[in-house]
Amino acid sequence: MEEHNLILTDIMKTGQNQLYEGYIRFNTLPDQKFDFTNEYYFLHNFEKKYDRKIALLDISHGLVGLKKNNEFIDETKKRLEKLQQDDFKIIIVLPWESYDNFIKGNFKIKEFEKEIKKNYLWHGQQSWFWFYMVIKNIKNNLSFDHSNKKYDFLYLNKQPRSHRVKLYKKLIENKVLNNSLYSFTDHENPVKLNANYELPWIDSEQRYPMYGFDQDIYEKPYNEAGCSIVSETNDNNTDVFMTEKIWKPIIAGQVFVVHGNYQYLKKLREIGFKTFESVFDESYDEIQDPSKRIDALAELIQKLKGSDWNKIYKQTEDIRKYNRKTFWTKSHLSDLINKELHRWFKFVDSSKISS
């Protein structure tokens, strides 16, 4: 039996409401129908009976920037109260960040702490950045050619998170990166990517922009570097958070190793992709201790330095083609989005019963 859902895609319309609607529309749930609005004041147009009414409260950078505006805070609280009186259930929206970043980061707003604690938090896992990279790059005419590898590694670091600093320093000390393309946005000693390989559409004389360009892809560094060292946002053991950093080499058909969460590669395989365990040692992925995982990863990178990249690319051709095809196949991503929406429904339905 078909269920009918009403989604208010952003209570205050300060976030990415159009993207959130696009994400939900990517579902392939046969028994679910959705009506959307991004305008709180248009809700009176949706008076028919719904099985679920869901309102998204975006607590990403837009709302955080407004948390000192008392008028905005008061209006948000008023809307939340009214929506819940009208049987809406609240989904807290932070898909751009991991749960770990939410706990440690700048996303706590004291006026909404109770709301955040009692409602479902949609934080970044594996599907959000996959979706975002699909819609951002689907119309781009990207061209990749791996026949002429000039460098060993492509290693891009932005925010100097502690786990990144540890691996970066180890690789620099061991002179592993002396034939590589790399950057490190250290506030004290920043290292810029070679200007010939930087995004041509940004000002290479300025500091790399904080927002807006991380998901852009320029083919040249992926074509000429043998292996991406994917420097992910977190290296904790709690939840696997996949950002654009993994999807770029997959889109490019490039070999990669990952400095990320415990069992990151295992999760990548679980959602349908292949890794390179048949070609080189990926046992670092099974090491729980972050420091020991860095040691094992550094040892692997040392061994890969100076590889016969033409040989490795022939060995990995089927894996890389498979991953690109999987990335661009809508049904694979839709399956993952379906699972996320089922988690929303479970929260909404259980809260209706408990109330």
Image (spheres, rainbow, N blue to C red):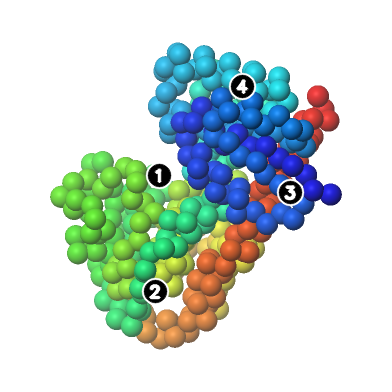
Contact, mark 2 vs mark 4 (Cβ under 8 Å): no
Residue 169 vs residue 315, the one in the foreground: 315
CA distance for labels 2 and 1: 24 Å
CA distance for labels 3 and 1: 43 Å
Contact, mark 3 vs mark 1 (Cβ under 8 Å): no
What's the residue at 79%, 30% (across, down)?
Answer: 352
Q: Nearer the viewer, mark 3 or mark 2?
A: 3
> What residue does disc 3 label?
32
Q: Residue 80, labelled with which disc? A: 4
CA distance for labels 1 and 4: 37 Å
CA distance for labels 3 and 4: 25 Å
Percent across and percent down for residue 224 are 30, 73
Helix, strand or loop under label 2: helix
> What residue does disc 1 label?
162
Q: Nearer the viewer, mark 3 or mark 1?
A: 3
Identified by mark 1, the residue type is Ser
Earlier-in-chain disc, 3 versus 2: 3
- Is 251 left or right of 322, judged from the image as shown? left
Q: Residue 304, labelled with which disc? A: 2
Res 217 quadrant in image: bottom left
Percent across and percent down for residue 236 are 54, 47
Identified by mark 3, the residue type is Gln
Neighbour class for label 1 at 10 Å: few (<14), some, many (≥20)?
few
Identified by mark 2, the residue type is Leu
Percent across and percent down for residue 24 are 61, 48
Q: Can residue 153 be seen here? A: no
Earlier-in-chain disc, 2 versus 1: 1
What's the residue at 40%, 27% (across, down)?
Answer: 65
